[in-house]
Amino acid sequence: MVILKKGDKAPAFAATDQDGNPVSLKDYTGKKVILYFYPADDTPTCTTEACNLRDNYADLTGKGYEVLGVSSDSEKSHLKFIGKYNLPFRLVSDPDHKVATAFGVYDWKKFMGREFIGIHRTTFVIDGKGEIEKVIEKVVSKKHTEQIFETT
């Protein structure tokens, strides 16, 4: 897996959010973005991660961050996930894995003894100029916000 690193330019992307509205990185020019990739809506670890970001959302936005979650789930699935857990941020639908592939997080992985291609749980902190400030490859779901705020 070839993953982007600190100092790289974040790839441009165009996709849709939970409401079917277009979303792209250029929409956030001049803003800091937390772009987090996760395997699936409404699974235990992904829910813990999303709820950690939700519970710390005021701190994140207070420091100027916009939060975007990305998975291969459908818009409908994202909308249900947002409603069930009262998530205050947008979720990007990436069913063809173009966004995940551009960021290098769609690759072979192992889970419970089997190998398959999927999204690796990874977070990118992107500055207002579109440059990657930080990459978190080993996301600890219940401490995700702490990891974002840790200096490297």
Image (tube, rainbow, N blue to C red):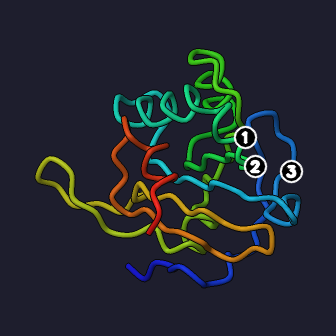
Q: Quadrant of residue 90?
A: top right
Q: CA distance from mark 1 to mark 3?
A: 21 Å
Q: Nearer the viewer, mark 3 or mark 2?
A: 2
Q: CA distance from mark 2 to mark 1?
A: 5 Å
Residue depicted at 60% across the width and 74% down the height: 102
Element under disc 3: strand
Residue receiving disc 3? 22
Q: Are marks 2 and 1 in contact (CB under 8 Å)?
A: yes
Q: Position of residue 108 (x, y in %)?
A: 32, 68
Q: Give the amino acid at mark 1.
A: Thr
Q: Give the amino acid at mark 3.
A: Pro
Residue receiving disc 1? 61
Q: Is residue 152 above or below residue 34?
A: below
Q: Are marks 1 and 3 in contact (CB under 8 Å)?
A: no
Q: Quadrant of residue 101?
A: bottom right
Q: Give the amino acid at mark 2.
A: Gly
Residue receiving disc 2? 64
Nearer-the-camera pick, 61 or 87? 61
Q: Position of residue 17 (x, y in %)?
A: 76, 42
**How many numbered dots are placed on residues in this image?**
3
Element under disc 1: helix
Q: Is residue 1 above or below residue 96?
A: below
Residue depicted at 50% across the width and 53% down the height: 148
